[in-house]
Amino acid sequence: MTEIKEDNVCQPREPLSASRFRRNWAKLRRNKAALVGAVLILMYVLSALLAPVLFTGNPSAPNLINSLETPTLKNPLGTDELGRSILGRIIYGSRISLLIAVGVVSVGIVLGIPLGLVSGYYGGKIDFSIQRVTDTLLAFPGFLLALALVAVLGVGFKNTVISIGISMVPMYIRLVRGCVLSVREEDYVEAARAVGTRDVIILIRHILPNVMVPITVQTSLSMGMAILFAAGLGFLGIGVQPPTPEWGTMLGSARSYLFHAPHVATFPGIAIFLAVLSFNLLGDGLRDALDPRFKI
Amino acid sequence: MSEPATPLLEIKDLHTRFHTLDGTVNAVDGVDFDVYQGETLGLVGESGCGKSVTALSILQLLRCPPAEIQGRILFEGNNLLDLDREGIRKIRGNEISMIFQEPMTSLNPVLRIGEQIAEAAKIHKRMTRQEAWRWAVEMLRMVQIPGPGSRSKQYPHKFSGGMRQRAMIAMALSCNPRLILADEPSTALDVTIQAQIMSLMQKLKEEFNSAIVLITHDLGIIAEMVSRVVVMYAGKVVEEAPVKELFKDPRHPYTQGLLGSIPVIGRKEQTGRRLQEIPGIVPSPMETPLGCRFHPRCHKVMNRCQEQEPPMIHLAEHRRVSCLLEA
């Protein structure tokens, strides 16, 4: 459900003619950093999809005899304090992390885009009230806000997504509102009003597609941030609960053995680091590829 | 030319003000004129004299606030300013439509041309998607775009300026409106295309029997296209006349200045002489001069022009001038 929604909104409805798409793709490809990001993301996605193939067995089943093993051929990244394969848990953990990331940006998009559109287009009192709420939310550091929401809602996968999602909403509102403020002054918006188009249609058909590029970029960056936030909550023990393999939770439980078995914390840490890095690289690359040519 | 007795559009004492932080701007200050069914009315004046704001006020396309529109705009007897948002929305594009100055920016770059033309038909004629699309193709054919079927599927960046303006015209005409407000429809185009667009508009106007309010500062177009002219200066009407009389016998010194600033190649008395210009610039609407608004630039200025606002003097039907010389 969430995935479908995200796809719908994210589809840039620009003139994606074949040549234009090829040009953007060529630009993106020339940007080596973005390409590395895209390849890494693809790897994460593949490992999430193919988890049962890549790692046979239950990643959550303890095997206390093998606890805290250093990397071996059988367990390439070693085992954790309950003797579970770290590689297996990282592979299964990518499912959780990517699902959280997709869920979070869906919450951000579903709430943030309409509010931003309305706020920017109508202005006046509506804008004022939405923006003051946004100001209040932005006054909290994002992670603290997510933390506070978890404290209210409780732990678990669903609440993690909702909390981090809501902490992303003000960013989307601000971004969309800013773009709408400039697009709404365009002649074609006035022309659409002059033929009697309803406001809702103007917002969805005329304005939204024209603000899709910054939203796409922001979405890529937000996914990285969502993974980081989710890992943070997991680390504090208030995110996704064990024994579900989640990178932050793995990191949190490995903390106790940091001096005795540093690899237990290192590998999930690297997984988080690379995931966040790749989304940021892709986001920056998308911005470079899409922004300067946005107005042809 | 026999005109029906009741005008299609009557503008009475229209005031449009913008309340800004620097003060109130009176962009349109007591304008009135009529438009009759099937005629083309020219609205002439320098940049910033309130022509476009008048048109935008008719369709209420100005953001209120900061804008404030007062007066009466009677369309077929009903005051458009009394309508609510929904009411005026049903008028826009359906009864009264507008063609904008900038064809390059007036089409949405992310929507297919056909979709944009079909929009009005979908809204006002309750056509289905396919019907509206077929109608859009038909409209494109009507505005003489070659290959309308494939062209309608293209995005605006594949259209040239002239073709975009044709598409805009198709959009404006797609619901067969009674009145078209054309705000400098050819200013942004080069001269050959201008002529094509103008003759196209003339042709379609006759086909659809719509009235046109043609806003322009190009007197050549006025001479060719319109039957009656309203001259505006600094937010007010200074003269109105049937087009022939205006060119033959301009009464207001401003109109005389406008007509005098057109070069006429080969006219004897002009050879070797400097082209006339009107000195100075249009006063800012925030600090309009006392008395007659034109007096600081007028070559026939008298003492009383500085204190007394000139009354509107009706010389004949559709022939009026606002100048103390006539009083």
Image: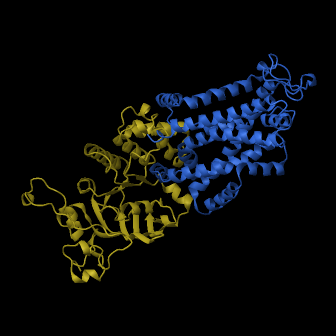
Chain colours: A blue, B yellow
Residue at the spot x=68%, y=41% of the render?
A225
Question: Can residue B8 be seen in the rendering of this structure?
Answer: no
The residue lying toward the viewer, choosing from A237 and B235, is: A237
> Could you tell me which residue is drawn at 80 percent across and 24 percent down?
A88
**Residue A146, image x, y percentages:** 76, 48
- When asked about the image quadrant of residue B53, the answer is bottom left
Asked whether residue A212 appears in the rendered view, the answer is yes
Quick one: A17 or A51, which is closer to the camera?
A51
| Figure quadrant of residue A241 | top right
Q: Quadrant of residue A123?
A: bottom right
Asked whether, in this view, residue A58 is left or right of residue A13, the answer is: right
B83 lies above or below A259: below
**Looking at the picture, how far across and down is residue B286, in whole percent?**
39, 72
In the picture, the quarter occupied by the N terminus of chain A is top right
Which one is in front, A224 or B69? A224
Residue located farthest toward the top when viewing the structure as drawn: A73
The one nearer the camera, B254 or A223, is A223
Image x and y of residue A216, in percent: 59, 39
Reply above or below: A141 against B297: above
